[in-house]
Image (cartoon, rainbow, N blue to C red):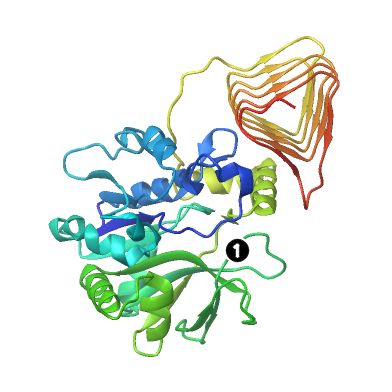
Amino acid sequence: MKLPMMGVVNLIHETEQMGPLTDGRCLATVPFGSRYRLIDFVLSSMVNSGVPNVAVFAHTKYRSLMDHLGSGSNWDLHHKKGGLFVLPPAMEDQSDFGKGDLYHFYRHRDFFARNQQEYVVITRSHMVCNIDFARVLAQHRERNADITVVCKEWPGAQTGLTRKVRMDADGRVLDMQDHYGRLASDIISMEMYVLRKELLIELVETSLAQGRDHLVRHAILPRLNELHVNAYLHEGTLGVVNTIPAYYRHNMELLNPDVWNELFFRPGPIFTKVKDEPPTRYRRGSETVHSLIANGCEIEGSVYGSILFRGVKVRPGAVISNCIVMQNGIIGENSSLENCILDKEVEVRPAKGLKGSTDTPFVAIKRNVI
């Protein structure tokens, strides 16, 4: 069933500290979980929930984004009655590049005007989760909220950068602060906002007229007392992936079968760009234990507790422990890797030793020879 709601994946000024992993790509297309990209999770959740139209507001380094999304056919978003729209940053001159998301929403206001859906869900790409937006919309309507913020109760230390949220017993949001704030709360924002399209347009126009151009910082936070901002608590698995330690941690959590099954199949499947590759070949003498290995790999050495993307080659005598090796990596003979993240097409020379830690993994940049 189609929801009366359009989707917006907002890539304008996403907060991230991913270092070399985003040197040549935007955060949305950082590889994750052996064959996926970060944007796949929120995009699949929208499709599974019945959101018919999705606009991706691109910002920087979006060539890989265009290549990955294509026509949207892998997410069934290429049909005539709906679809996927990748909207480039609206720029008249270089000064427009630094402007906030409200400015770009305004410049693409024709997208909102020609869609008939009553509601909008605005998300970021770095929240790795599987969520039913139909349930979020149902609570939004039931509580007669102006804006609903999807939140997660997350006690303890966090490796990702998040906004903390304070709410009352009825679920009304009283305060929100960025990750560097001192708000004492175990509730974090998942950067997903449901509101009526008319309210969004009013927030856009009013804020821009006041010289303010950021949705959350300028349009929502100053109006928490005026608007009824409701919190929807997500109970499923969540990964906030916008720092290197968070990327490493949440990838490794996928080696837990319970986390894997919940994230990728409940409440619906996660889709990605389809690539036809042969099955992984395990040569005589190879060994793999507790690992996630995509198709197209060739394993001649030993792989322990690691995640290998498509086309990785592990040569004889090589030992990989607790590592993430992205597409087409080559691990040379008798080399040793522990707690490492290797970007696409990295080659490790024979007999090379690389070691990081779980808090500070060793990171190799794309197409590098080590």
Residue drawn where x is 55% and y is 71% of the image: 163
Task: Tell me where residue 57 appears, x and y as whole percent.
Answer: 34, 52
Return the residue nearer the eye: 267 or 333: 333
Left-right relation of 213 to 253: left
Left-right relation of 67 to 157: left
Left-right relation of 74 to 26: left
Q: Is residue 172 in view?
A: yes
Instruction: Check the picture and name the quadrant holding the C terminus.
Output: top right
Task: Tell me where residue 168 appears, x and y as whole percent.
Answer: 51, 87
Which residue bears the numbered disc 1? 161
Q: Is residue 119 above or below residue 341?
A: below
Q: Is residue 5 above or below residue 154?
A: above
Return the residue nearer the eye: 137 or 195: 195
Q: Is residue 4 in view?
A: no
**Furthest residue toward bottom:** 225
Task: Tell me where residue 80 appears, x and y as whole percent.
Answer: 16, 39
Residue drawn where x is 23% and y is 70% of the image: 201
Task: Determine whether the residue tagged by mark 1 lies in a helix, strand or loop.
Answer: loop
Return the residue nearer the eye: 158 or 134: 158
